[in-house]
Image: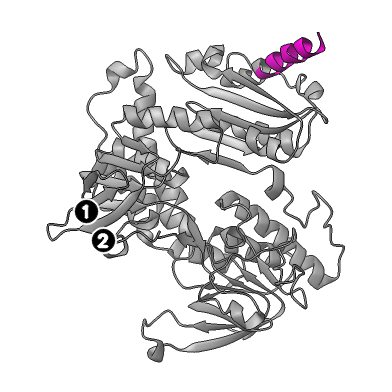
Amino acid sequence: MPSEYDVIVIGAGPVGENVADRAVQGGLTVALIEAELVGGECSYWACMPSKALLRSSEAVRAAGRLEGAKQAVTGPVDAAAVLRRRDAFTSGWDDSGQVEWVASAGIDLVRGHGVISGEREVTVRSAESAAPEAASERVLSARHAVVVATGSAALLPDIPGLAESSPWTNREATSAEQIPSRLAIIGGGVIAAELATAFASLGSHVTALVRSELLSGQEPFAGELVGAALRELGVDLRLRTSPASVERGDDGVVRVTTNEGDVVEADEILVATGRVPRTSDLGVERIGLEPGRWLETDDTLLVLGADGAPLAGDWLYAVGDVNHRALLTHQGKYQARAAGDAIAARANGTALHDERWGRHVATADHTAVPQVTFTDPPVASVGLTAAEAEKQGVLTRVVDFEIGSVAGASLHADGYRGTARMVVDEDRGVLVGATFVGPDVHELLHSATVAIVGEVPLERLWHAVPSYPTISEIWLRLLETYGRSNEQVEQ
């Protein structure tokens, strides 16, 4: 392999793979550095295995909501079979298939831990040996750009005894070989809610300790509906409860003492309290940045220095979780496409389209980030919540509608329960936020995303006629309710 490339990408998860692919398509040579598995967190310890753990139980419950189908459902979910299916989606934690794709895309893969050792320079320590003195080093230089796509890791909060209790993070949970009889979960965000759903469905008695409210960053009704569903699954959901200390005894049992003085016993404890950037051992201090901090970028994904301006030479980019813009795989891949194309444009001397919604910027990160929480029911949201819009000074009208009142929803599931909300910017007459909670609502999300990104006027949305009878008819009901609200205001 050569020692000089047009672009060097550190981190071969889906985000790093995408930026490398776009740069190659732009005519550039690329080295892709990875210390672990090619395919990254999403492929092996997050998105894919977690959804595989969730799906089988979700399908059984969906059948149980339909007369005629529920009579055919006999017996519990086969947890061992679910784990085998999960293993198939991770390829048994073998990245051979991903490595083949990298080669087929014309990208050079370099195994090892990459560290920024100078301007446009990365030193790679081989991953063959855990002993630093036995590892070999290779220095690579980039003619145009270095891209950091190292992602994030689980945050381990400073709780007495927690670190010594061998806690699970998302990695241990999604790769578990057995389902624990009792599982304690610390956290109330997306990861905590999804894994509480998964393990309760597979037979664990789950106790969830949530410091404030469940899914607190989303619309309040989302946490309320998901919380009710978790309790129906048998989850001991304790809101406004924090662990004061944790201890794993000689018998292997984890004992969590809460701030209320109660003791929760479990076989395993899962920590899902947030994420931290993988920048502590990246060498960023050599270029004036602080290790262990998120890498702030502009909209073309160039890393900004302490003065808020791009680093000298415009050569360092950060995409995905590590820049803290939107910690979601699909949004990181979106950033990667913009960054890869921007790098190619700058390298080739072609026009840079860095205007709002231009080809080389990640404008959607600010106003149109879609997200699905794969609980049962799922939560699908995009754009601003009502509280966020109000905080930004947007003159809004909030419209809610019960999805179960839509004919398509009542056909979809007996006793369908769910809520839809749209947040409207009254000054512009456009949608700025939408949230759906209910069975299979994630398939509604892209229509809301298109409406927000396209800034489609509500007057025009009336002409987007939903098919009958489908759950999509919720759009008509929301618009009708909005129309009646307007009439009342005018009167």
Would you identify the image quadrant in which residue 19 lies? Answer: bottom right
Would you identify the image quadrant in which residue 28 lies? Answer: bottom right
Q: Nearer the viewer, residue 79 or 248?
A: 248
x, y percent for residue 270: 33, 52
Q: In the rendered image of this protein, does residue 317 appear above or below residue 110?
A: above
> Helix or strand or loop: what does disc 1 sit on?
strand
Residue 372 in sight? yes
Q: Residue at x 76, y 70 (%)?
A: 310
Q: Residue at x 47, y 33 (%)?
A: 223
Q: Main secondary structure of the magenta part?
A: helix
The N terminus lies in which quarter of the figure? Answer: bottom right
- Mark 1 vs 2, N-terminal side: 2
x, y percent for residue 385: 63, 35
Disc 1 residue type?
Val
The C terminus lies in which quarter of the figure? Answer: top right
Magenta highlight range: 478-491
x, y percent for residue 161: 28, 61
Give yes or no for contact between labels 1 and 2 (Cβ–Cβ under 8 Å): yes
Q: Nearer the viewer, residue 346 or 490?
A: 490
Separation (CA) of disc 1 from disc 2: 7 Å
Q: Which residue is mark 2?
A: 165
Q: In the rendered image of this protein, does residue 315 appear above or below residue 21?
A: below
Q: Which mark is residue 197?
A: none
